[in-house]
Image (tube, helix red, strand yellow):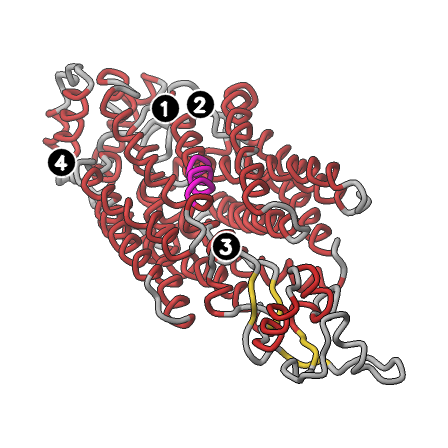
Amino acid sequence: MLTVDDVLKQVGEFGWFQKQTFLILCLLSAAFAPIYVGIVFLAFTPDHRCRSPGVAELSRRCGWSLAEELNYTVPGPGPESQCLRYEVDWNQSTLGCLDPLASLATNGSPLPLGPCEQGWVYDTPGSSIVTEFNLVCDDSWKVDLFQSCVNLGFFLGSLGVGYIADRFGRKVCLLATTLTCASLGVLTAVAPDYTSLLIFRLLQGLVSKGSWTAGYTLITEFVGLGYRRTVAILYQMAFTVGLVLLFGLAYILPHWRWLQLAVSLPIFLLLFRFWFVPESPRWLLSQKRNTEAIKIMDHIAQKNGKLPPADLKMLSLEEDVTEKLSPSFTDLFRTPNLRKYTFILMYLWFTSSVVYQGLIMHVGATGGNLYLDFLYSALVEFPAGFIILVTIDRFGRRYPLATSNLAAGLACFLMIFIPHDLPWLNIMVACVGRMGITIVFQMVCLVNAELFPTFIRNLGMMVCSSLCDLGGVLTPFLVFRLMEVWQGSPLILFAALGLVAGGMTLLLPETKGVTLPETIEDAENLQRKAKPKENKIYLQVQTSELNTQAAERDASQGIAQQK
């Protein structure tokens, strides 16, 4: 009985077809970066002060520099300088040009302060949703809500989009979600008000993560065992390339609407390439659509310049013998080991999101150059990918994943004790933590795909990673509310999450060298150490009528039976 991996070994595990498909899908991964972290540039908050036409006129009449205007007319330093103003009639003629407020203060009492009633002046040559919709001071929480909406969309869309990918196919899911995501991106760029902006952002979150995950699942199912982990890691490194490209676009286009259009319109072009990407043969076989799967395997062989196995077409004789496997949410919790895998992976996804986004927000809250800080934090993800490629074959999945969680948690713990007068040390340790949690983010995707059987693989990915989205919803509020209590409070939370995640990772089985499980029984048996010929994926699922004969044949060959 031929397996998918047997066929790929003959027609090419990573030939021209897989390389071409991989590069196309990597563009999708890069396009996801602006959706996930685009808030850094779309909603940046520049220095600001209350708008006062009287102050502007007095400054013009007196010939003040900007520094003199701020010194004479703005209360501060601190939050008062950005959210409060002196309740003074700046148009009165008695005000002089040299310390105009000195004559108004009586008996040394401070001048009364009031809210900014005429808007704000922002010290930036560009624009963001903050400057356009005045999301500062009492409305600053709306920036957190903007980011939480896209993560809420990820969370709500996880189950639905994951089910579509497993029920109707990876390609259908990929095309539908990519088209919807691109359209909503354009609508976001032309949103007339804050409310419509939130709606479009939420809807984009509903489909964008499903598009990325469908591409991830598709490429890992197209390649052979020897290249599965490499393409999985490189697919995620394409996300880092998207971060660097986002930095360049944001630097060139400092106005948020133009930037949003620049990252949304190219996605439409990807649809033309996605149309020529075939459906996953593994998924087709799990649905008992063997004839279509065989045609795709022939297509792969032709593209790779190889001849398919001579007995490939014989597999279609038993096409309608077995019952089609349909994904179900309860399958994720049906057996003891699957329950354990699901709960542990949920926690790992949650921790990855909170620590990853939380470190970005916490470091960003300390100030610095917006563009350089973003670039440095993006570049540190490249060595994380290479560390995985070097260690994953030598040490497997479990130990590097556990070590990276522990490193991230320890880095966050050490940051608590770093003095404020050593910012360079704080950035260095933060980069270590960022690298560690990036390794976790990339590896948990790979491990998640390797632990679930084919017919619920995409559903398992979406359900477990939905906790990542829930973490993304909570993180903005956790970070900034805890920082109001004490600046190091979020770091305590990050450290605890990372250290616990490191210990829980050791409870998962090692999946190095193990072929993708096809059925629940295969996934349940992953806890055993796989033998070279065990746990292979068959191009056809056997029926109960053939079980006895198959068991006798498999016993003689040393191959585990696929039920």
C-alpha gap between disc 3 and disc 4: 56 Å
In the figure, is residue 28 to the left or right of 320?
right
* Residue underneath mark 4: 292
Residue 328 visible to the viewer: yes
Q: Nearer the viewer, residue 173 or 310?
A: 173
C-alpha gap between disc 2 and disc 4: 28 Å
Q: In the rendered view, tell whether residue 248 sits above or below residue 85.
A: above
In the figure, is residue 104 to the left or right of 244?
right
Which quarter of the image is occupied by the C terminus? Answer: top left
* Residue underneath mark 2: 513
Q: Nearer the viewer, residue 302 or 103?
A: 103
First in sequence: mark 3 vs mark 2: 3
SS assignment for the magenta stretch, majority: helix
* Residue underneath mark 1: 225
Q: Residue visible at 24% across and 20% down?
A: 16
Q: Which residues are magenta?
A: 239-249
Snapshot quadrant of residue 547? top left
Q: Does residue 247 show up magenta in the picture?
A: yes
Picture disc at residue 125: 3
C-alpha gap between disc 1 and disc 3: 51 Å
First in sequence: mark 4 vs mark 1: 1
C-alpha gap between disc 3 and disc 2: 54 Å
Q: Nearer the viewer, residue 302 or 518?
A: 302
Snapshot quadrant of residue 421? top right
Cβ–Cβ under 8 Å for marks 2 and 1: yes
For label 3, the crowd category at 10 Å Cα-Cα, with few meaning under 14, some 14 to 19 and many 20 or more, is: few
Q: Does residue 496 show up magenta in the picture?
A: no
At label 4, the amino acid type is: Glu
Query: Residue 143: horizontal and vertical position, in percent?
Result: 53, 64
First in sequence: mark 2 vs mark 1: 1
Secondary structure of the residue carrying numbered label 4:
helix
